[in-house]
């Protein structure tokens, strides 16, 4: 099993727990950033649809002609067309759909690393943990994490606040024991009665 100093398991465990916590926040922040961009993308799309329908039809011209003078009516129609052009340009410039996908991809990579850190924590908490193998796994995870962060798009303070709120106040990745037991097959439930199985 290799040599280890007293307390080395505790130090490895403390480091793995700290890194797990950081990855949990990063993962959730990227999920929230993807949600923010997705909502913006959908709003832009709806705005473009509504403006395109309004500016391309004779409906707007007829409606404006009923309530407004001809000169003002043509200004209103021109303004709606200008808004459509601006919305189209903004949608092409900001590319919220692409940004959404980049954050979702990053969140998926971070989820994998997060779950691997969780497995490392379980390994380190078990009796007879192979510390040299655990050190190697920690180093491998560090390399995976470095690659994930190196390719990660930036998140906003708003996404981080939403992640923090979800994790701390809403329990986004936690379960109460009864809820978790209901999600697991009966043979894996902790609250099961062995006499019933």
Image: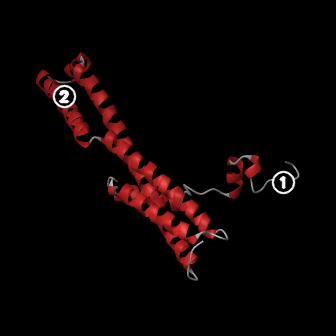
- Asked whether, in this view, residue 145 is left or right of residue 51, the answer is right
- Residue at the far bottom: name it: 6
Q: Position of residue 181 (x, y in %)?
A: 71, 52
Q: Quadrant of residue 125?
A: bottom right
Which numbered dot is residue 193? 1
x and y, in percent, of residue 169 in the image: 53, 60
Q: How is the image coloured?
A: secondary structure
- Residue 130 point in image, percent of width and height: 60, 69
> What is the total number of numbered labels drawn onto the structure image?
2
User: Outermost residue toward the left?
Assistant: 71
Say few, some or many: other residues with alpha carbon within 10 Å of mark 2 (under 14 / 14 to 19 / 20 or more): some
Neighbourhood count class around disc 1 (C-alpha, 10 Å): few under 14, some 14–19, many 20 upward:
few
Q: Is residue 3 left or right of residue 25?
A: right
Q: Which percent across, then down, holds residue 4? A: 56, 78
Residue 13 visible in this rendered orientation of the protein: yes
- Residue at image position (19%, 32%) is 85
Dot 1 falls on a residue whose secondary structure is loop
Q: Residue furthest front?
A: 2
Q: Secondary structure at mark 2?
A: helix
Quickly name the residue at label 2: 81
Which quadrant: the N terminus? Answer: bottom right
Q: CA distance from mark 2 to mark 1?
A: 68 Å
Q: Tell me if residue 127 comes above or below residue 176 in the rendering.
A: below
Q: Residue at 57% x, 74% y: name it.
A: 2
Contact flag, marks 2 and 1 (Cβ < 8 Å): no
166 vs 197: above or below: below
Left or right: residue 150 versus residue 25 is left
Where is 118 relative to 109, above or below?
below
Q: Quadrant of residue 67?
A: top left
N-terminal label among 2 and 1: 2
């Amino acid at each position: 099993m290799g040599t280890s100093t007293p307390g080395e398991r505790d130090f490895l465990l403390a480091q793995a727990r700290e890194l797990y916590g950081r990855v949990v926040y990063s993962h959730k922040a990227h999920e929230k950033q993807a949600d923010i961009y997705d909502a913006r993308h959908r709003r832009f799309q709806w705005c473009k649809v509504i403006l395109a329908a309004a500016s391309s039809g004779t409906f707007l011209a007829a409606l404006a002609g009923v309530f407004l003078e001809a000169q003002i009516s043509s200004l209103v129609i021109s303004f709606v067309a200008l808004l459509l052009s601006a919305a189209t340009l903004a949608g092409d410039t900001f590319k919220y759909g692409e940004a959404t996908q980049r954050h979702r991809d990053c969140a998926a990579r971070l989820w994998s690393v997060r779950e691997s850190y969780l497995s490392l924590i379980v390994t380190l908490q078990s009796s007879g943990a192979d510390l040299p193998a655990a050190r190697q796994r920690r180093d491998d995870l560090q390399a995976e994490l470095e690659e994930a962060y190196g390719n990660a798009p930036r998140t906003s303070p708003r996404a981080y606040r939403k992640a923090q709120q979800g994790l701390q106040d809403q329990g986004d990745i936690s379960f109460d024991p009864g809820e978790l037991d209901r999600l697991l097959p009966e043979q894996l439930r902790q609250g099961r009665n062995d006499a019933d199985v």
